[in-house]
Amino acid sequence: LQISHNTNAMLTTFNEIDMSGYITLREELKDVFAEKHKVKLGFMSGFVKAAASALRFMPVVNSAISGTDIVERDYIDISVAVATPTGLVVPVLRNADQLSFAGVEKAIAELGTRARDNKLTLADMAGGTFTISNGGVYGSMMGTPIINPPQSAILGMHGTVKRAVVVNDQIVIRPMMYVALTYDHRLIDGREAVLFLRHIKDCVEDPRRLLLEV
């Protein structure tokens, strides 16, 4: 983390996500999903799929700086922060863009079990191109995540809280989540970061976009 502070020109951009669409989808399909795939449908699969889509949409976020070179990657390996009794570890979902929702949930469950049993290897945690950290499971409302070197960006998820928001000029109560994207400004400019995070927001708020790849 100290290397990240000393090396990266870190900036953070924020947005908020109306989780009502994703929560409705999960409530409607969670039983049939669990019956078919033998795993629960959680928030993480939606965010991993949305992040993978955003990395295809804005590939510079999937790139990295190596010395004086910019390394462009044609694969998407997403590191996911997992809690263990001794602290956080960040195992990697390989080729995350090729996984289904069920594939993501199964992979995270397996990695989480191995992490808690202290069976993860260094290879399991090496080589990620982007990281997702979910502080919301601990009740975090907002924070600025720190980039995991040599990656160039990290997405921070936070708690989902019912708040009053304006929709079609009406004040309504919606389950809202603040999200944060910390990025290396040496490589990613503000416009790219904002559009990247907006793409994640759009996909989570309307998961049909993931099916149609729009």
Image (spheres, rainbow, N blue to C red):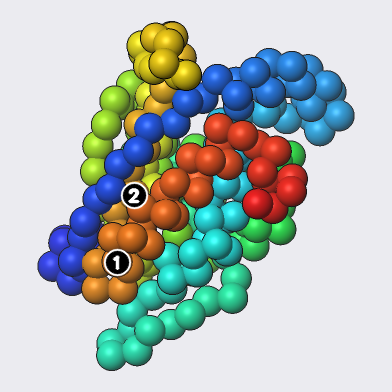
Mark 2 residue element: strand
Query: Pointer 2: residues within 10 angstroms few (<14), some, or many (20+)?
Result: many
Instruction: Name the quadrant containing residue 75.
Output: bottom right
Front one among 151 and 56: 56
Picture quarter with the N terminus: bottom left
Q: Which amino acid, mark 1? A: Asp
Q: Residue furthest front?
A: 169
Q: Position of residue 143 (x, y in %)?
A: 24, 37
Query: Residue at (53%, 55%) from the top-left corner?
Result: 54
Residue matched to label 1: 189
User: Could you tell me which residue is drawn at 45 percent across and 18 percent down?
Assistant: 167
Q: Amino acid at mark 2?
A: Leu
Residue 30 % position (x, y): 73, 21
Res 208 quadrant in image:
top right
For this view, does 68 lie left or right of residue 114?
Answer: left
Q: Nearer the viewer, mark 2 or mark 1?
A: 1
Pointer 1: residues within 10 angstroms few (<14), some, or many (20+)? some
Q: Give percent across and percent down for residue 10.
A: 21, 60
Q: Is residue 121 above or below residue 6?
A: above
Q: Is residue 71 above or below residue 11?
A: below
Q: Element under label 1? A: loop
Q: What x and y, as percent, mark residue 88?
A: 36, 43
**Which residue is at 36% across, 53% downward?**
194
Which mark is on residue 181?
A: 2
User: Quick check: 6 left or right of 85?
Assistant: left
- Residue 175 appears in the figure: no
Q: Residue at x 44, y 71 (%)?
A: 60
Tell me if residue 192 can be seen: yes
54 relative to 109, above or below: below
Measure how far apart labels 2 and 1 are at the Cα level. Answer: 12 Å
Q: Mark 2 or mark 1: name the one nearer the start of the chain.
A: 2
Q: Residue furthest bottom?
A: 68
